[in-house]
Amino acid sequence: MFESKKAQGMGVRELFVTLAVAGVIAIVGLLIFSNVTSSIDQSTFTTGQNSTAAKIKDTTLDSFELGVVALIVLAAVVILSVVYMLGR
């Protein structure tokens, strides 16, 4: 009986670590993306190239927003698992 609680506690600890690491990776990824896109000279781009670059930026930023939603869901899972374990 004690071994199963220990295993559950380790799972919650790993979820906390995953949440922290994923948050740091998301912030670093967004920083790298913003630095790379700001350093690209678009003065010689055609209209089609500018619209393609804008679509790429929008799609990438939308994916970062979805990543934040995934982190919120993961945090909710961690909180619910801790509350569930406290109720036992």
Image (spheres, rainbow, N blue to C red):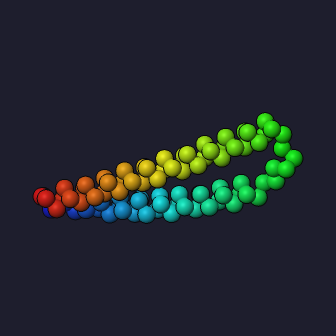
Determine the image quadrant of residue 31.
Answer: bottom right
* Residue at position x 78%, y 54% in the image: 40
Residue found 41% across the figure and 59% down from its top: 19
Relative height, residue 47 to residue 25 (above, below): above
Q: Residue at x 72, y 43 (%)?
A: 53
In percent of width and height, residue 24 lies at: 51, 63
Judged left or right of residue 26, residue 35 is right
Residue 14 is left or right of residue 82, and the answer is right
Q: Residue 69, how many percent across, how many down?
A: 43, 50
**Residue at 32 percent of width and 63 percent of height:** 13
Q: Quadrant of the N terminus?
A: bottom left
Residue 75 appears in the rendering = yes
Residue 57 rendering spot, x and y as whole percentages: 66, 47
Q: Residue furthest front?
A: 47
In this picture, residue 56 sits left or right of residue 1: right
Looking at the picture, tell me which residue is in the foreground, 27 or 55.
55
Q: Is residue 22 above or below residue 49?
A: below
Q: Is residue 11 visible?
A: no
**Is residue 33 placed above or below 53 in the rendered structure?**
below
Q: Nearer the viewer, residue 79 or 4?
A: 79
